Amino acid sequence: MTGPVRGARVAGVSIDCADHRALATFYARLLGGHVDWVTDSAAGVTAGSYTLIAQRVAPYRKPVWPGSSVVHLDLTCRRDDLDAFAEHAQACGAVLAPEQFDDRWVVMLDPAGHPFCLTPIVSEDPQADRHRDSSSERS
């Protein structure tokens, strides 16, 4: 049996889209980051210590949400900033998802149709809220 490889880590998250430049610009603006690099088929955005890569694929098909298994981003903020974060996301080009499932977070769709959640569930102290809701549901 093998174990984890020393030094292995998540280097970034890649998101498929039709227009990588536009999607990279959207996420840079949304997250207060910047577009670090652009090629003919991809663009890298740095926001804090994270890298997001928008990569052009053809033909691109928007995800169906809800209704299919779609990986999504959870973007966190302070609880009292949730409404302002949602307004900022819309000003950047996101739209409110037609279905909202829980008032503790807001589901948005980016310009390429990918769902992402704005959530205060994760606090500024990563250990404080870790698995708080999932552990209480197991009881």
Image (cartoon, rainbow, N blue to C red):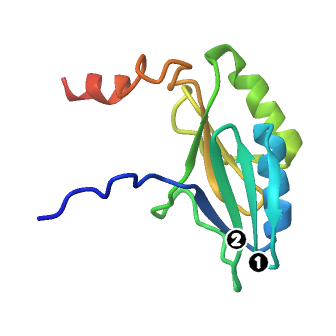
**Nearer to us in this view, 122 or 110:** 122
Residue at image location 69% in from the left, 80% down from the top = 57
Q: Is residue 97 left or right of residue 40?
A: left
Identity of the residue drawn at 42% across and 20% down: 129
Residue 41: image tag: 1
At horizontal 75% and vertical 29% (from top left) the residue drawn is 85
The quadrant of the rendering that contains the N terminus is: bottom left
Instruction: Label 1: state its secondary structure.
Output: loop
Residue at horizontal 27%, vertical 26%? 135
Position of 67 compared to 12: left or right? left
2 and 1 marks in contact (CB < 8 Å): yes
Q: Position of residue 113 (x, y in %)?
A: 70, 61
Residue 5 point in image, percent of width and height: 31, 58
Front residue (pair 60, 65): 60
Q: Amino acid under label 2?
A: Gln
Q: Which residue is mark 2?
A: 55
What kind of element bears circle 2? strand
**In the picture, residue 25 is in which quadrant?**
bottom right
Q: Position of residue 71 (x, y in %)?
A: 50, 57
